[in-house]
């Protein structure tokens, strides 16, 4: 698996993802609008990472990456560069999702593993907060398999939802 942005020649694969956005996860593609070309979308993501002209609904700079396996996009990761916003201690640093047709194959576990490496190596975040809904048993398992250490479960006053909160210390990667 690779976490990266699509190259220009991969626009058809990107279009397949746009058409396959899961009903259980309408925000699969952050900051995307239906009428955007791949080039326009990549420009939005680049600015979001650099904190230039950021989207009104964004809180802090973030890096959005696609998970590729054998040339297919199977999922994605989003890495917030800091927790320095009102919801930071609830949303955590890293979010991930896998397209329905690719679930149950260990891809989310790999996405979180690679996103943790990216957070440490590229963004200088060694102590990562990952949160999930208490009922999201698959996500809890993904976090546990990435050595998440449970801190607590808190009520998110903004949404009225509870969140389980885990910390992961990322070890330097030399591979
Ligand atoms: C949660 C999600 C990312 C999991 O993706 P995935 O690629 O299927 O996950 P994996 O294949 O890596 O499997 C994760 C683990 O969860 C387990 N699992 C999967 N579904 C489960 C369920 N309903 N109940 C309990 N465990 C479950 C798997 O068996 C696996 O554990 P194992 O290796 O010990 O057998 C995916 O369902 C998804 O994208 N959901 C919508 C977005 C979302 O919830 N993102 C997480 C936000 S915190």
Image: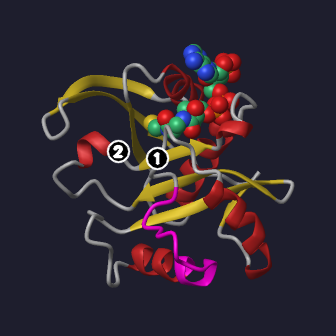
Identify the residue position indicated by label 1 in the image: 95
Give the quadrant of residue 51. bottom left
Vertical relation: 86 (above or below) 52: above
Please tell me which residue is depicted at 71% across the width and 60% down the height of the picture.
Answer: 16
> Which quarter shows the C terminus?
bottom right
**Residue 22, percent from left and from top:** 56, 44
Ligand 1 under 8 Å from disc 1 Cβ: yes
Identify the residue position indicated by label 2 in the image: 92
Please tell me which residue is depicted at 42% across the width and 67% down the height of the picture.
Answer: 31
Please tell me which residue is depicted at 46% across the width and 24% down the height of the picture.
Answer: 136
Q: Is residue 38 magenta?
A: yes
The prevailing secondary structure element of the residues shown in magenta is: loop
Distance (Cα) linking label 1 and label 2? 8 Å
Query: Does any portion of residue 146 appear in the rendered image?
Result: no
In the image, farthest residue toward the left = 157
In the image, farthest residue toward the right = 70
Tag 1 near tag 2, CB within 8 Å: yes
- Return the residue nearer the eye: 133 or 26: 26
Tag 1 secondary structure = strand
**Residue 8, percent from left and from top:** 73, 81
Crowding at dot 1, Cα within 10 Å, few <14 / some 14-19 / many 20+, comes out as some
**Residue 72, percent from left and from top:** 80, 56
Tag 2 secondary structure = loop
Q: Is residue 146 magenta?
A: no
Q: Is residue 85 left or right of residue 74?
A: left
Q: Which residues are magenta?
A: 29-42
Please tell me which residue is depicted at 63% across the width and 38% down the height of the picture.
Answer: 108
């Amino acid at each position: 698996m690779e976490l990266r942005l699509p190259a220009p020649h991969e626009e058809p694969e990107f279009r397949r993802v746009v058409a396959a956005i899961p009903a259980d996860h309408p925000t699969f593609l952050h900051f995307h609008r239906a009428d955007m070309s791949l080039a326009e979308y990549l420009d939005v993501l680049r600015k979001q990472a650099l904190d230039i002209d950021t989207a009104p609904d964004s809180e802090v700079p973030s890096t959005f990456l696609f998970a590729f396996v054998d040339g297919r996009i199977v999922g994605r990761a989003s890495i917030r560069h800091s927790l320095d916003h009102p919801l930071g201690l609830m949303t955590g640093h890293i979010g991930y999702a896998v397209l329905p047709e690719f679930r149950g194959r260990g891809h989310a576990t790999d996405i979180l593993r690679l996103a943790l490496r990216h957070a440490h190596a590229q963004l200088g975040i060694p102590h990562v907060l990952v949160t999930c809904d208490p009922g999201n048993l698959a996500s809890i398992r993904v976090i546990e398999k990435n050595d998440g250490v449970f801190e607590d479960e808190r009520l998110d006053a903004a949404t009225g939802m509870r969140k389980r909160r885990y910390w992961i210390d990322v070890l330097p990667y030399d591979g």
